[in-house]
Each structure stands twice: as C-alpha cells, then as structure tokens.
Amino acid sequence: MEKKYCTAVVLAGGSGKRMGTKVHKQYLMLKGYPVLYYSLKAFQDSSWIDEIVLVSGTGEEEYCQKEIVEKYGFSKVHKIVAGGAERYNSVWNGLQQIKEKDGFVYIHDGARPFVDDAMIERAYSCVEETNACVAGMPVKDTIKVVDEKNYVKGTPERKTLWLVQTPQVFNIQLIKEAYQKLINEKIENATDDAMVVEQMMGHTVKLYPGAYENIKITTPEDLLVAEAFLYEYTRKLSYVYSLISKNVKTGQGNLLKNMTENRDT
C-alpha cells in the first residue's frame, strides 16, 4: 500500500512560566541545541514525514525562521504560523495551513525532544489502521482520584491507566472537522487532541507505545532529566562506534556499522 502524505504540526508557542525563566522553554539550550531542535530534527530526518508546520508564539515567527529553521537547515518546514491563546487555538492555526486533503497529521509538542523515528513509524502503522491514535505509556505509580479538599475518592486500576504523550496522529479530514466543530461551538475544556476527536466526533482513539523518555520539558527538573537521557544515549553511541573501530579489520565492522545506522533511535 502506498504511503499517505504526512504532515507534522509542531507546537512551539509555550511560555517559560513553570520553568522560571524569561526564555521560553522550547528555546532553552539542551546540550548545545535549543529544545525545539530535537523534535524538528526527528521529523526532518524521518522518511514518514513529508512536511512540517511550525506553530510559534505570536511575534516569534521571524526568530524561528532565522534562528531555528534556516540555522539548522530544516527544509521540511514549509510554514511558520503564530499560535493562539490556548493550545487548541494553536493546533487549529496549524491545521489550517495543511492543504493536503488526504493523509495524516502528527501533532507534537515542541518541548518533547525525544520523539524518534521508531515512534513515528509506530504511529503511522497505528493511524493507518484506526485514523486516530496517541502516543502513551502505562503508568508506573498508583493513581488516586481526590475531591476538592484532597480526600481520596477512589483508586483506579493501574492497568487501565496510561500517560498520554505526543505525537497524536489523525486522519487529516477527521481532525480538521473535529477542531472546526470545537471552534464553532466555543468549547474550551479540551486538554489534548484526542479529547477533541473523542468529544466532537465520537471517534475512538487508540494508544500506541511512546517512550518513558518522551518527556515534556516544563520545569528545571525536566531539563536535568533530559540532559541525563542525552548523556546516556551519547555514551552508548560512543561505545558502539568504538566496537566498529576495533572490529573494522576483521570484517565485523561493517555489520556493526549497518546495525548502528539502522537502529531505532
């Protein structure tokens, strides 16, 4: 079956309030690159993605064009559009830039730097089957439901609970129609794209495996965790390349090199 056209809508309009900095979280430096760089790089390098729509903060379009897109050579970014007051406004602004009538759209938080090609591929396989799917992972902790005074009202079964992440991926016509209804009906309590599709269209949404490393950079602690993830990844990659160097004369080097180049990062 021929691959359908895929657009990534990357949301980069968040502020740095919880981060406690004047610099917006998506522009903070993480191992020498802005946080936003990593998710754009994943979509840029993925053969599953045909174009990228970048949704920036209002007034930040030129900065994103020069300091992010042009500086790092993100040629798949075809549009940069200003976001809105709320997340759903920003998503809607991004969706309106997509001209393709058939295909899929990946909606992703630019402050989640650890999306990778394996995750993008898993999403494609899932959305091709379901038309609506969301990255997530089973929760590890016990979750409590509380009342307005923080008294426990109940304890859901942990096996039924997942942490929801992005990319959230949909048939383009389905998600556009869902958001059009949301905007028309002026509903403001939607916290993610899956909820919009569920409530506006009555369409079921399937979860596919994301990654526990696929965190959203929101607080200073998140930035420290992200740096640790990158350090560990770099350490493992250095070890693999050292094996390639040691074994290149024995004929094993090419095998290791191919394994590395085709790895699921």
Image (cartoon, rainbow, N blue to C red):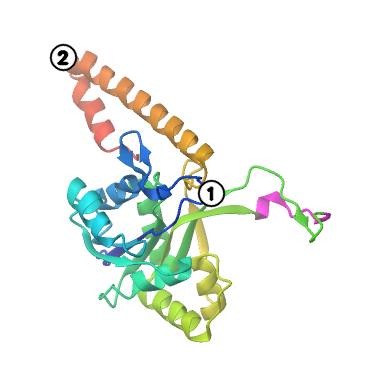
Look at label 2 and name its amino acid.
Answer: Lys
Q: Position of residue 151 (x, y in %)?
A: 83, 54
Q: Which region shows up in magenta?
A: 151-160
Name the disc covering residue 26, or none: none
Report helix, strand or loop for mark 1.
loop
In the displayed structure, does residue 126 sit left or right of residue 142? left
Question: Can I make out residue 65 in this image?
Answer: yes
The residue that label 2 is drawn on is 249
Q: Position of residue 27 (x, y in %)?
A: 35, 47
Question: Can I make out residue 1 in this image?
Answer: no
Q: Quadrant of the C terminus?
A: top left
Image: 151 above or below 87: above
- Does 157 appear in magenta? yes
The residue that label 1 is drawn on is 18
Q: Decide which of 138, 32 is in the foreground and name it.
A: 32
In the displayed structure, does residue 136 sit left or right of residue 60? right
Residue at horizontal 80 percent and vertical 54 percent from the top? 150
Q: Decide which of 192, 24 is in the foreground and name it.
A: 24
